[in-house]
Image (tube, grey):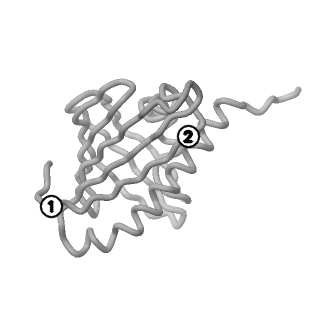
């Protein structure tokens, strides 16, 4: 849903993981559930139709037990380069563009660009969302690190 003169939040990080691995951490709903959202949230993904026009339904549960059912619709998916989706609810509607770029064989840049309706509430949310996005990236790094270096279990 394009907005005229949108409020835009861009978050980007270079990750010490190959682009395919970073893309897969989103494309695999079991992995996505482990890291999506800011610190303190857990996730249950109810539907994940990872295709253009597909629906993504996820309940994000805050550390205080409050549930937030989120509904999004996928737009463009270009494996392993780009994902777009529209987040419909709750609280704020936004368009998300995720870009996955190769930095080297073992590093990639993940960039998120969120675009929202230009209003006072969304403008006020920008600092919170920017911080939440950084926490999302932190959580993603921890999941990728755990997959790359699984803890050995000794019997």
Left or right: residue 52 versus residue 131 is: left
In the picture of the structure, the residue carrying the numbered disc 1 is 5
- In percent of width and height, residue 36 lies at 47, 47
Considering the image in quadrants, where does the C terminus appear? top right
Q: Residue at x 43, y 53 (%)?
A: 60
Say which element carries label 2. strand
Q: As drawn, which residue projects farthest toward the left?
A: 4
- Residue 131 visible (yes or no): yes
Label ID, residue 143: none
Q: Earlier in the sequence, mark 2 or mark 1?
A: 1
- In percent of width and height, residue 41 lies at 51, 56
Image-quadrant location for residue 144:
top right
- In percent of width and height, residue 79 lies at 36, 24
Q: Residues within 10 Å of mark 2 (few under 14, many from 20)?
A: many
Is residue 41 placed above or below 77 in the rendered structure?
below
Left or right: residue 46 versus residue 31 is: left
Q: Residue at x 22, y 29 (%)?
A: 52
Label ID, residue 15: 2
């Amino acid at each position: 849903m394009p907005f005229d003169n949108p409020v835009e939040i861009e978050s980007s990080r270079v990750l010490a993981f190959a682009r395919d691995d970073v893309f897969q951490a989103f494309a695999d709903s079991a992995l996505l559930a482990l890291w999506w959202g800011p610190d303190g949230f857990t996730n249950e993904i109810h539907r994940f139709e990872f295709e253009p026009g597909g629906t993504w339904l996820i309940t994000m549960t805050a550390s205080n037990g409050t549930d937030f059912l989120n509904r999004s619709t996928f737009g463009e998916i270009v494996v392993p380069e780009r994902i777009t989706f529209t987040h419909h609810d709750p609280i704020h509607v936004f368009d998300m563009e995720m870009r996955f770029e190769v930095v080297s064989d073992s590093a990639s840049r993940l960039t998120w660009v969120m675009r929202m309706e230009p209003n006072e509430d969304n403008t006020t949310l920008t600092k919170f969302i920017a911080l939440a996005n950084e926490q999302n990236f932190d959580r993603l790094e921890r999941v990728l690190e755990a997959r790359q270096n699984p803890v050995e279990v000794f019997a």
